[in-house]
Image: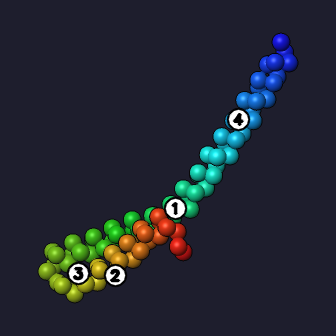
Amino acid sequence: MAETKINKYEKEKTEIQLNARRLETQRDEAQRHAQPFGLAVIFLQVAILVSSIAGLLQRKIIWYASLPIGALGLFYFTNGFILFI
């Protein structure tokens, strides 16, 4: 009786350890993607802010300044998926 319980718990322990390692791998992969996505959000929000200011002031030169900021945000957004840098 006790031996069957020991075998059962050893088997469960092994399954739990395998599942934990799989989840740790998923967590590590998600952390690798998190930083580029965080930077993308920052740059895209700044681009939206600068574009809004340009609209309020009716200045195209300020709007043109927001374009490279937005492009940088799109670059980091793409990097979040592909991880090329």
Q: Secondary structure at mark 1?
A: helix
Q: Quadrant of residue 43?
A: bottom left
Q: Quadrant of residue 59?
A: bottom left
Residue located beneath label 3 in the image: 63
Q: Position of residue 2 (x, y in %)?
A: 84, 15
Relative horizontal placement of residue 61, taking residue 58 as reference (left or right) = right
Q: Which residue is mark 4?
A: 15
As shown in the figure, which amino acid type bears the numbered disc 1? His
Residue visible at 25% across and 84% down in the picture: 64
User: Residues under labels 1 and 3: Cα distance?
Assistant: 30 Å
Q: Are marks 1 and 2 in contact (CB under 8 Å)?
A: no
For marks 4 and 1 on the same chain, the one whose residue lies earlier in the sequence: 4
For this rendering, which residue is in front, 52 or 41? Answer: 41
Q: Which class describes the residues within 10 Å of circle 3: few (<14), some (14-19), or many (20+)?
A: many
- What is the distance, in whole Å, between disc 2 and disc 3 at their CAs? 10 Å
Foreground: disc 4 or disc 3:
4
* Residue toward you, 62 or 40: 40
Q: CA distance from mark 2 to mark 4?
A: 50 Å
Residue 40 lies left or right of residue 15; in this view the side is left
User: Can residue 36 be seen in this snapshot?
Assistant: no
Judge from the rendering whether residue 22 lies leftward or rightward of residue 31; answer left or right: right
Marks 4/1: CA distance? 28 Å
Mark 2 vs 3: CB contact within 8 A: no
- Residue drawn at (43%, 69%), measured in percent from left and top? 78
**In the rendered image of this protein, does residue 24 appear above or below residue 35?**
above
The percent position of residue 33, horizontal first and vertical second, equals: 52, 62
Residue on which disc 2 sits:
68
Residue at 27% x, 71% y: name it.
49
Q: Where is mark 1, residue-wise?
A: 33
Number of marks drawn = 4
Determine the CA span between mark 4 and mark 3.
56 Å
Q: Earlier in the sequence, mark 1 or mark 2?
A: 1
